[in-house]
Image (cartoon, coloured by chain):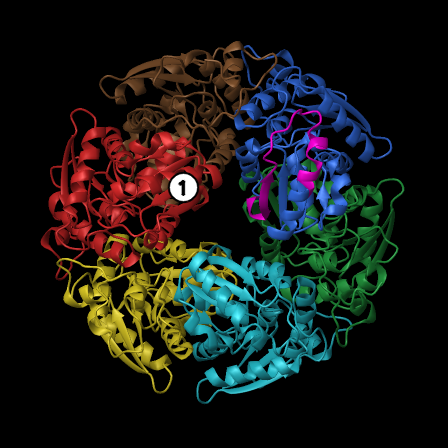
Chain colours: A brown, B blue, C green, D cyan, E yellow, F red
Amino acid sequence: MRLLVLNPNTSASVTDRVAGTARGVAAPGTEIVAMTATRGVPYIATPAEALIGAAVAIETLAEHATGFDAAVIAAFADPGLGAARELLSIPVTGLAESAMLTACMLGRRFSIVAFTPALGPLFRECLDYNGLAARCASVRFVTRPFANIASVHDEQEDAVATLAAEAAQEDGADVVLLAGSPLTGLAARIADRVPVPVLDPVSPAIKHAEALVALAPRKARLGTHGRPEPKPSTGLPPALADRLARRP
Amino acid sequence: MRLLVLNPNTSASVTDRVAGTARGVAAPGTEIVAMTATRGVPYIATPAEALIGAAVAIETLAEHATGFDAAVIAAFADPGLGAARELLSIPVTGLAESAMLTACMLGRRFSIVAFTPALGPLFRECLDYNGLAARCASVRFVTRPFANIASVHDEQEDAVATLAAEAAQEDGADVVLLAGSPLTGLAARIADRVPVPVLDPVSPAIKHAEALVALAPRKARLGTHGRPEPKPSTGLPPALADRLARRP
Amino acid sequence: MRLLVLNPNTSASVTDRVAGTARGVAAPGTEIVAMTATRGVPYIATPAEALIGAAVAIETLAEHATGFDAAVIAAFADPGLGAARELLSIPVTGLAESAMLTACMLGRRFSIVAFTPALGPLFRECLDYNGLAARCASVRFVTRPFANIASVHDEQEDAVATLAAEAAQEDGADVVLLAGSPLTGLAARIADRVPVPVLDPVSPAIKHAEALVALAPRKARLGTHGRPEPKPSTGLPPALADRLARRP
Amino acid sequence: MRLLVLNPNTSASVTDRVAGTARGVAAPGTEIVAMTATRGVPYIATPAEALIGAAVAIETLAEHATGFDAAVIAAFADPGLGAARELLSIPVTGLAESAMLTACMLGRRFSIVAFTPALGPLFRECLDYNGLAARCASVRFVTRPFANIASVHDEQEDAVATLAAEAAQEDGADVVLLAGSPLTGLAARIADRVPVPVLDPVSPAIKHAEALVALAPRKARLGTHGRPEPKPSTGLPPALADRLARRP
Amino acid sequence: MRLLVLNPNTSASVTDRVAGTARGVAAPGTEIVAMTATRGVPYIATPAEALIGAAVAIETLAEHATGFDAAVIAAFADPGLGAARELLSIPVTGLAESAMLTACMLGRRFSIVAFTPALGPLFRECLDYNGLAARCASVRFVTRPFANIASVHDEQEDAVATLAAEAAQEDGADVVLLAGSPLTGLAARIADRVPVPVLDPVSPAIKHAEALVALAPRKARLGTHGRPEPKPSTGLPPALADRLARRP
Amino acid sequence: MRLLVLNPNTSASVTDRVAGTARGVAAPGTEIVAMTATRGVPYIATPAEALIGAAVAIETLAEHATGFDAAVIAAFADPGLGAARELLSIPVTGLAESAMLTACMLGRRFSIVAFTPALGPLFRECLDYNGLAARCASVRFVTRPFANIASVHDEQEDAVATLAAEAAQEDGADVVLLAGSPLTGLAARIADRVPVPVLDPVSPAIKHAEALVALAPRKARLGTHGRPEPKPSTGLPPALADRLARRP
């Protein structure tokens, strides 16, 4: 099984860490191919940045998805996830969605611990989009600015552990999600300091991608992820235009 | 007052009709400048197409909004609306949002009548994004394919009138919204055939843009539409990169 | 355009201030006629007081609305708004509804800052009635009693500014509404001290009334704001009885 | 125990039928005193009519409640219920609320069967006000006009029985509520024709009033049904003004 | 009227206190027969314990309900309530449901004060099951461990009174419910210290059971509480197997 | 990896089919051990039957789970799922939950197609318990009685295929879930006749169990699935009593 793991941010160092986590949790026989967005921002924090990342994501996936069994959009707010499902015929998963759905199997309510308060509005939109706001106990943020997106997981280890424990003890969280992708790898390091399960932001999306490949659902020919009749377009990248036009 | 009315679709004929409606309802002293997207699809019907249109919309607005008092994104699903509010310092309105909020002042529940069933998933996402699904009585679609997006308002006049009346009589709609922009101009023609108010998709967004200019709210420095610290980017159009970097 | 602005409270000094705000924001050519309830309470704070004010409002509007293009019920909980829409054939707006709908175009979540905690239950009912509770970040109150309803806007300027800023910084409000009508005029004075837009309670309802007149919706003949067959009544003020009986 | 049963409509014949049902279901030792509104409409069908009835209800209760152990507002949309609870110190129940709460103990979802489609918007507001819309399977109406409000229960017996059975068989109703007060007495007559429990609109409110008297809750000194400081008023009926002023 | 009051916990001392409260509030002519579960846990605190108690409850009721007019499941989370309604032909009430529904008649929002934080998840499930989470202002717990379930009502009197007052003053509770059954009897003792009504956990369920007997609803032959065709079973207690098989 | 797949129904033939599906979808190296409930009903259809099955499920799991890496409760309404998660230290999945969460990755709204209308109330409770009712487009049932639970998948193949297609075409389902376990194996056979993905009821739960084992979350020491202090019990099966007492 070949999985295309796309980081819609431009930080190659984060892509490397994401790929490391992915390979660590993937089943034997799953090949992880990681890609970094060639345009956009170093890390997506706001709705406008997520829109930019989403547009880049579907262009990249339209061009590169052929030959893969599934794709993973490796940013916590899942930029472009629904559109990718509509445009591609392989399963696509996202970090936020997979983490939240997995959390639903580990507890009744989850909390999200994130590395900057700037992510607040974006994560609220993400919760609403997934219809899971009622299962979210709280969203907590490290408020002290970080020095470097590549090392934020190290800089904030203690702060994240403290917030995760507080989410369980004070907010009633049954499980804690670390968000977003720059924090990958941290969950295992802080697990002992938190009285409820802590989820890495990357791992659930890899396992869900593998699961969907195993379930082998047919591509929708109708509904939200079906594509209507071939549609002409103007000025779009050729691979994306081909998807809209349903050209093979 | 100068309003930039951006059609995020590539159909210039629709832009012309939208501009006509806008000028008809605008207050004396309001100048309407209409623009058509230079890339994208002829009309947005699905979430993936809306994402493409949203990306085009914010790039276009980032480049052209200077010198305007407000902007209107003239497609019913409001592609890029939230991102535009974050990136620009002038008020921005959208057709769907404005029509739905106006409907809330004319009744307790509204129905949407649209020109193709392919719009269903996109409109449901739009209702959810606005948190107004509970005030929506129904979404009805003309199911017979139309010949031409430029003339769909003529082709479907009778079908739309019938659906609008049924929405009032059978679904409990207190007001009916016509969607999307290609239907502009039709509401007045069918009003006598519908027992509840019928809203044109363009007019409310123009009046709301004028109202917001009059209210003169300060640009948010915090929250969903505030911009955090200047952010570097790679490979984006210069005007958009400038907005992210908070360069004047 | 002639707008009837009805204060359903008995405080003429508040009516004067409301009229001042209304005239300041109205378009050229809009004539503001302000009226004060001749019976009721000095300011409405509870559901029972709102009911009393609502009954007075519809009696007053039934008697005086003829000759106006639209009416505004100038108390924040919108007493009698739905009933007025049913009984009158001109558009009617209310302070709370208009402020909340306008807030929805300036942010994803709003907070309400009010001049006394006694307003809490009434405002919660108002949020629920409008189906917008999920878009309300918080309701904050000045807890120190005010000396005089006519000067509460002066007495509480600093307290309101502080609460508004806290709503943005601590509660995640993207926009703050000042409530209710006795605070009109204060928004502009505190805008610089709040990092998100601050809305005056009166201005949005004036602009919405103007917008609805421009949109010229037909009077509903069905649904929530339609009137069924003529209905007899006993012991009601003649103008109100005429509306029920559909006497011209 | 003395119960004041107030019909906020002006139809004395309906009051008589309501009183009959009330006496039939009341416990030994419960005295039923029934009153009819002296102004208003013969039967409340719309939100505006409900507001008129609510204002009459609180004026009447303010004047006459002294000496009673509890009061019942005997119209299905519960006009004035919340305000009465705020103004009086005895328990007050309403037909719609009591029927819906009782239905919650007899099933997971209820349907409402009513005597005219004109009641639709009012009942939807009532469901929302009680936060019970999610437990309502459907609202069905007899669409054929009735000849006389005093005999509607006879005229519509078969039609109501059919709708009630359809609500159970087609809409998934676990219990059916007959609405409103003019239909009292009909539930027992059609029970055999409906495969789920059928609730009379009057009986639950009587039993709830008795139950609340037995539970003897203290009058709230805070919150929604507490009264704040004494409040002056102008032009209101003396008994109502006294309640606002907290004069004994 | 004979009421079977079943304590699904194994603490006979709590059963005695519940029976005392029940007899104190019951109408003349109501006979209270109290039973204690013969297996299970001393007091139910978690979802797993509630499931164990629920299974015991329906077995016990299946065996002993014959000859009673109604049954009360006397634990606050209502273990087995829905299943009992399906299996029995007499009305069944539960402490949590009755308390919450009664609270809806005494205010718009209620708070729950309970004797251990371990009850949190179970009470949240109970609120959701009843669809009343939106009417719950808060759930507060005494955090200091109690010495003995039989005397917890004495140990915690002051702590409960304080939490109840705080719920009214800080959380906006219009009414406070004491939970669960071990706290019965405490409401009356603390009523003077709380500015809103305080409900005993047992009394409302008794009054609701009496009310349902008076209303005499037919046993559902369809829907959630109807029983489908007779069903065979294996290894179940004979009385329960008989109910499933619809053997008289 | 060893998975314990427990059928909480007493139909061994269904267990065999469930085991077959499980083995077909399991990863290499996953050993499936299937068990059938030794008491209960042949197939669970109602809330009371689900409660009986849930009690049996936790007793069985308490006794047999040792030595397994995860457990699957193989009935569509997930009887005992939450309690099992509380009592066991290994991950537990359920058919309904896993199918619904998987559906959330394949579309925005799903429909459920089931083999008897008697399942309606149980499935509605299941949707509510998971907080996913808003993502359910419809629940459709084969209404013609089946002859044998062991062959219902053959008897209803065409009826299920028709309902699944109608759910996509008429109800707006983006994906269709077949429910419950007796229908396992049917999804693949009808996939070509349905324009959206069709999910087998068993497969997602197997893949989720494998995924959770790979993610290796710590057992909660707090929250909904944590166990509080050791608790004594009376009359329970020894293995279950040990879990409550936290005896190893």
Whether F78 is among the magenta residues is: no
Q: Quadrant of residue B52?
A: top right
SS for tag 1?
Answer: strand
Segment tinted magenta in the rendering: B133-161
Q: Is residue C49 left or right of residue E153?
A: right
Provide residue A56's location: percent of width, then percent of height.
51, 16
Q: Is residue E60 left or right of residue A121?
A: left
Q: Is residue D154 above or below residue C155?
A: below
For the residue pair F10 and C38, the one nearer the viewer reads as F10
Image quadrant where residue C42 sits: bottom right
| Tag 1 residue | F111
Can residue C35 be seen?
A: yes
**Residue D191 at x, y = what percent?**
43, 73
Residue B136 forms part of the magenta stretch: yes
Query: Dot 1: within a 10 Å radius of its alpha carbon, few (fewer than 14), some, or many (20 or more) residues?
Result: many
How many numbered marks appear?
Answer: 1
Please tell me which residue is depicted at 55% across the width and 15% down the height of the picture.
B232
In the shown orientation, is residue D49 left or right of residue B227?
right
Identify which residue, A220 or E190, lies in the foreground.
A220
Q: Residue at x 55, y 35 (%)?
A: B120
